[in-house]
Amino acid sequence: MPTNYEAIGRCKVLDDEIAKLMRTRSSKLSALSVQLESTAEYQSMRFTVPSVNTEAFRNEIKEIDTINELLREKAQEHNEWADAAEVSRITFE
């Protein structure tokens, strides 16, 4: 079978996009974790009942969900080209 340079190129570009999205998602998850931990610590103070603005948390989670969807799409597209490019398929768990 001849080398399919188009498939190889597409997989390479998709791999790079997936890696960037994964770094972004990881960063957002880490930041959200810090925000949640900080809020939890503040909640444990005696004689204080602070309000919690969960809207910011929901917005962050929506952004993470959007990134997850993009990752699924990019992984699916990568897998459509993987056999022709003779590269491993991506498993999205």
Image (spheres, helix red, strand yellow):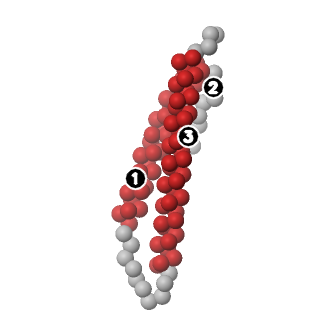
| Residue 27, horizontal then vertical, whole percent | 52, 53
Q: Kindly report the distance in space between the C-alpha atoms of the residues bearing marks 3 and 1.
A: 20 Å
Residue placed furthest toward the top = 2
* Residue at image mark 3: 19
Q: What quarter of the picture does the C terminus occupy?
A: top right
Q: In this view, does 74 lie above or below 43?
A: above
Image: 47 above or below 2: below
Residue at left offset 45%, top offset 45%: 67
Q: How many badges with numbers are in the image? A: 3
Task: Evaluate whether residue 79 shows in this view.
Answer: no
When asked about the image quadrant of residue 81, the answer is top right
Of badges 3 and 2, the one in the foreground is: 3
Q: Which residue is under mark 1?
A: 62
Which comes sooner in the sequence, label 2 or label 1? 1
Tell me if label 3 and label 2 are in contact, CB under 8 Å: no
Task: Using the numbered discs, state the Cα–Cα distance from disc 3 to disc 2 in whole angstroms.
Answer: 16 Å
Which residue in the structure is indicated by mark 2? 87
Viewer-nearest residue: 79 or 15: 15
Rendered location of residue 10, percent (x, y):
52, 25
Label whose residue precedes the other's in the sequence (3 or 2): 3
Three-letter residue code for mark 2 = Val
